């Protein structure tokens, strides 16, 4: 579930407040939004995809919070991975959408299972 | 469209109201707007990220009209696993609608092209990009999109015809909204019974509850025993990588669960005995390399936990899909996805998909094609009805009962406890996947008691109403599912009864469920939909 917002990166655009399907964030008068309802997070990573500042970190554990060290996560290069691999925004010409390959993978698996 | 201020309440008048902003709702809004209707779409979360499509990658069921045998073959193949409950006529309609409609999204979705600039494939879309495209499309068509605005109940005219809905704005402190419309399309999704299935938290069966309160019936609710593998504690129910998976028990012994139709059952049996671990070492090297650009979210949990899934074994579980990769939902009464209730149409997972999926999971492909097609038909029909039936608030009454208005003395009822009770009956493999008459009866008694408490005592408004209505919808959906599963004393498709392990030829029927305080189930012969029924 959502663990932290990197305030130095956040531009306070409040896009995450808008796109979160379970209304986890609360906008503030000034500065970054806050994670007001962490338990409602459905661990879908959509906020990260829409965050052009790569300022959000969703932990992989959907059952309970797994506090992570922001400095370590920033150093690991994990922030922005989803948006980059999806080829969104500035990554558009570098990471092609190869979703169409999926059915060939299933076909190969079915052949291998025979 | 006009906006009327009524104290604190927000009122809108539209030709067509679409409830739900996932794939089916967005296609319904598209179709209605293209018919010239003024359309309002309300979404519990955000239209673009909410629902089962957004975080997934739907590969629509697809067969071009040429060569002529392609569709016949696709239908024959589906019929073999529909176990007598599919209807070829509906399958043909869905294949045709999908093939015609999906390429029209090209202005908004960048379909992949080959070196000659020819589109490789229209059928396989990435969820986030697909939903983003659909949102842009409906906004350009003039649809008014209200995000973070869950519907809580339908509004009806004195004759029972549906004329709108009411709900709240969760980002405005739960302030109420009411929308009057000539027709309503319910596209509120199915339900995973609040499992950790990716993207399904908002899918609490709200459409089933609201439709039933309006007088519609449920069909195929016994077909909820779909499960999908995911790394333990994660939501990542993306199946592709697991097509090459090998599974092991805690002692490192390989589990006999090859890729194929029995795999889920075998994994569930192993999970009942203890934890299981997965190896993706057999995933071909080229697929490993392309995985991040095929399904960009699959690697996220692994990268964050520091697991190399191609070299290390990792623990996995099975998440309940409920009616999402399952089948049951509101009974479709006419070819335009009418429900039998004037003014009320259903689309996507809110509708039963038995007509096209039969008794086996429609997975991401038949169910996606259905969501698009049913959305399109329902939206068009709603727009046409709205031309004849003017919208207005005069004489509308609210249909919501349990969770909003107590039948007895109001007192606090815990929504969270009701949800936990549903999970405890609908998730365990030894209750919902491997079913017995005795086990189902025990589930029924437990859920009846939860229902009784909600119906008698729960009363709410504002923000508190959302959680209670979600809990109510989950409990109602679970009760219809359990009652239908009890009545189907056989094994057919995804419905497995340990005490009735074979298919009973006399039960090649639909099971129609309904009722609240008393749940009823009755058989109905197949092919009972008619183009002439209920289009009033």
Image: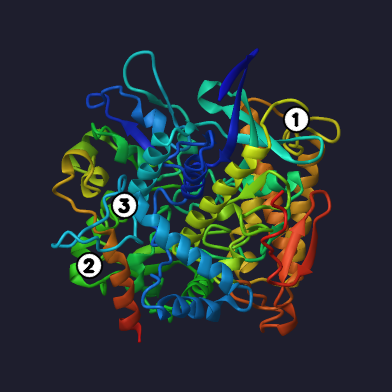
Instruction: Pick the residue in front: B119 or B53.
Output: B119
State the CA–CA distance, disc 1 to disc 2.
Answer: 56 Å
Q: Write down the chain letter for disc 3.
A: B
Q: Residue furthest front?
A: B388
State the CA–CA distance, disc 3 to disc 1.
Answer: 45 Å
Residue B237 can be seen in this image: no
Residue B322 can be seen in this image: yes
Cβ atoms at labels 1 and 2 below 8 Å apart: no
Residue B517, x across and y down, in percent: 82, 49
Residue B422, x across and y down, in percent: 65, 52
Identify residue for label 2.
B287
Q: At 73% from the left edge and 67% from the top edge, which residue is drawn?
A: B511
Identify residue for label 3.
B297
Q: Write down the chain letter for disc 2.
A: B
Residue A79, x across and y down, in percent: 24, 40
Instruction: Pick the residue in front: B165 or A69.
Output: B165
Name the element at disc 2: helix
Name the element at disc 1: loop
Q: At 57% from the left edge and 34% from the top edge, which residue is drawn?
A: B150
Dividing the image into 4 quarters, which one contains the N terminus of chain A? top left
- Rate crowding at label 3 as few (under 14), some (14 to 19) or many (20 or more) other CA atoms within 10 Å: many
Mark carried by residue B452 = none
Q: Is residue B284 left or right of residue B1?
A: left
Identify residue for label 1.
B396
Q: Count all numbered tags in the image, as a single digit.
A: 3
Q: Quadrant of residue B408?
A: top right
Dividing the image into 4 quarters, which one contains the C terminus of chain A? bottom left
Q: Write down the chain letter for disc 1.
A: B
Whether residue B506 is situated above or below residue B287 in the rendered picture: below
1 or 2: tag closer to the N-terminus = 2
């Amino acid at each position: 579930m959502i663990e932290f917002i990197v305030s130095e990166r956040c531009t306070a655009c409040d896009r995450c407040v808008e796109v979160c399907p379970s209304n986890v964030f609360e906008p503030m008068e000034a500065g970054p939004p806050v994670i007001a309802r962490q338990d409602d997070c459905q661990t879908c990573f959509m906020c990260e995809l829409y965050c052009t500042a790569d300022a959000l970190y969703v932990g992989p554990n959907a059952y309970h919070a797994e506090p992570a060290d922001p400095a370590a996560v920033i150093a690991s290069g994990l922030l922005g991975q989803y948006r980059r691999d999806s080829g969104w925004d500035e990554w558009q010409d570098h990471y092609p959408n190869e979703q169409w390959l999926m059915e060939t993978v299933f076909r190969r698996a079915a052949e291998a299972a025979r | 469209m006009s906006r009327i201020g009524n104290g604190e309440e927000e009122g809108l008048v539209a030709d067509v109201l679409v409830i739900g902003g996932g794939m089916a709702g967005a296609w319904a809004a598209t179709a209605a707007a293209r018919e010239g209707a003024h359309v309002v779409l309300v979404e519990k979360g955000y239209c673009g990220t909410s629902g089962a499509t957004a975080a997934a990658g739907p590969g629509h069921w697809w067969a071009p009209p040429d060569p002529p045998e392609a569709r016949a073959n696709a239908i024959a193949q589906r019929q073999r696993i529909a176990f007598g409950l599919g209807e070829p006529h509906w399958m043909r309609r869905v294949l045709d609608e999908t093939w015609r409609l999906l390429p029209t999204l090209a202005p908004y979705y960048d379909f992949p092209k080959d070196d000659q600039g020819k589109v490789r494939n229209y059928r396989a879309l990435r969820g986030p990009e697909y939903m983003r495209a659909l949102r842009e499309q409906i906004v350009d068509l003039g649809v008014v999109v209200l995000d973070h605005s869950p519907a809580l109940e339908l509004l009806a005219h004195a004759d029972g015809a549906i004329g709108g809905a009411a709900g709240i704005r969760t980002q405005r402190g739960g302030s109420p909204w009411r929308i009057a419309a000539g027709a309503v399309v319910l596209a509120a999704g199915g339900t995973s019974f609040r499992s950790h299935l990716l993207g399904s938290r908002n899918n609490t069966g709200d459409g089933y509850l609201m439709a039933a309160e309006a007088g519609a019936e449920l069909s195929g609710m016994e077909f909820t025993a779909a499960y999908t593998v995911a790394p333990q504690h994660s939501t990542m129910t993306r199946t592709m990588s697991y097509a090459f998976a090998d599974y092991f028990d805690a002692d490192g012994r390989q589990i006999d669960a090859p890729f194929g139709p029995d795999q889920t059952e075998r994994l569930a049996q192993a999970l009942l005995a203890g934890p299981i671990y997965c190896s993706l070492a057999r995933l071909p090297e080229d697929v490993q390399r392309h995985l991040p650009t095929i399904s960009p979210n699959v690697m996220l949990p692994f990268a964050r936990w520091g697991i190399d899934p191609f070299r290390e074994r990792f623990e996995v579980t099975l998440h309940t899909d409920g009616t999402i990769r399952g089948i049951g939902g509101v009974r479709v009464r006419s070819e335009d996805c009418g429900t039998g209730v004037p003014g009320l149409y259903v689309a996507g997972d809110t509708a039963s998909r038995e007509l096209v999926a039969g008794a086996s999971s429609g997975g991401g492909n038949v169910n996606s094609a259905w969501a698009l097609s049913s959305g399109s038909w329902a939206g068009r029909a709603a727009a046409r009805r709205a031309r004849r039936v003017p919208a207005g608030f005069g004489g509308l009454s609210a249909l919501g009962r349990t969770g909003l208005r107590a039948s007895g003395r109001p007192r606090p009822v815990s929504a969270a406890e009701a949800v936990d009770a549903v999970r405890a009956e609908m998730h365990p493999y030894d209750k919902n996947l491997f079913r017995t008459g005795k086990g189902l009866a025990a589930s029924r008694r437990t859920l009846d008691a939860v229902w009784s408490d909600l119906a008698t005592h729960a009363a709410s408004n504002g923000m508190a109403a959302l959680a209670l209505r979600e809990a109510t919808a989950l409990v109602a959906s679970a009760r219809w599912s359990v009652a239908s599963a009890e009545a189907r004393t056989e094994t057919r498709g995804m419905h497995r009864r340990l005490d009735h392990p074979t298919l009973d030829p006399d039960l090649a029927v639909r099971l129609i469920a309904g009722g609240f305080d008393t749940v009823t189930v009755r058989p109905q012969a197949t092919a009972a939909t008619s183009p002439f029924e209920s289009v009033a």
